[in-house]
Image: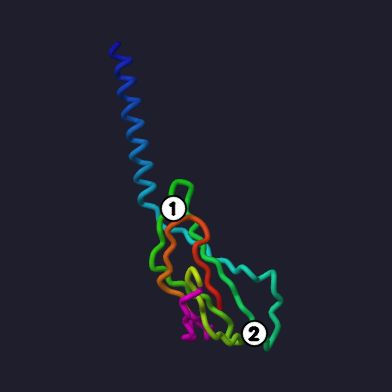
Amino acid sequence: MVAEANLVVSTIAASCAIYIAFLALKHTTKPRINVSLLNARDNVIRCNREAVFVFEVNNVGYWYGVAPAIDITIFCNFDPAFELKELKYGSEQEIINNHVRKGKGGLKFVRAEGIKLVRKGRLSSFTY
């Protein structure tokens, strides 16, 4: 009788410890973000022609939880041969940044800042 009670109490204690460990894992996750170029295969980019690059930002997350990614700043560098004009981003491409700067190695870039990704999946894209 005492052995059975000890088994029940040990099982309950172990279940509670596993649940608390899972909650700690879920609430301490860090964001995992993927940035991909959407139209790389669709269009052929020719010299001296204007082209639009569309990037997609995904909050991938983990199997046990998705942490919100808030105030993300994204830099996409381009070769100096590219003449960048502007960057449009936001849910409806309503934010425009046309401040082209030179970065490390002479690469040109425009940055997208203040992006918020709170759920899993495609929530934002930006266009050069």
Please state the horizontal and vertical placement of residue 62, each as a whole percent of the image: 47, 51
Q: Residues within 10 Å of mark 1 (few under 14, many from 20)?
A: many
- Residue ID at (69%, 74%): 43
Q: Which quadrant would the N terminus be assigned to in this image?
A: top left
Please state the horizontal and vertical placement of residue 127, each as a whole percent of the image: 55, 75
On whether residue 105 falls in the magenta region, the answer is yes
- Residue ID at (37%, 36%): 18
Looking at the image, the residue that sits furthest to the top is 1
Q: Magenta segment, which residues?
A: 93-110
The answer to the question of whether label 2 and label 1 lie on touching residues, with beta carbons closer than 8 A, is no
Nearest the viewer among 13 and 37 is 37
Please state the horizontal and vertical placement of residue 19, each as a whole percent of the image: 36, 37
User: Helix, strand, or loop for circle 2?
Assistant: loop
Nearest the viewer among 110 and 21 is 110
On screen, residue 34 above or below 45: above
Q: Which quadrant would the C terminus be assigned to in this image?
A: bottom right
On screen, residue 122 above or below 10: below
User: Helix, strand, or loop for circle 1?
Assistant: loop
- Looking at the image, residue 24 sits to the left or right of residue 59; the answer is left
- Residue ID at (57%, 80%): 78
- The residue that mark 1 highlights is 66
- Looking at the image, residue 32 sits to the left or right of residue 128; the answer is left
Please state the horizontal and vertical placement of residue 54, each as a whole percent of the image: 58, 72
Q: Residues within 10 Å of mark 2 (few under 14, many from 20)?
A: few
Alpha carbon distance from label 2 to label 1: 38 Å
- The residue that mark 2 highlights is 50
Amino acid type at image mark 1: Val
Query: Which dot, 2 or 1, sits closer to the camera?
Result: 2
Res. 36 mark: none
On screen, residue 17 above or below 71: above
- Residue ID at (61%, 78%): 52
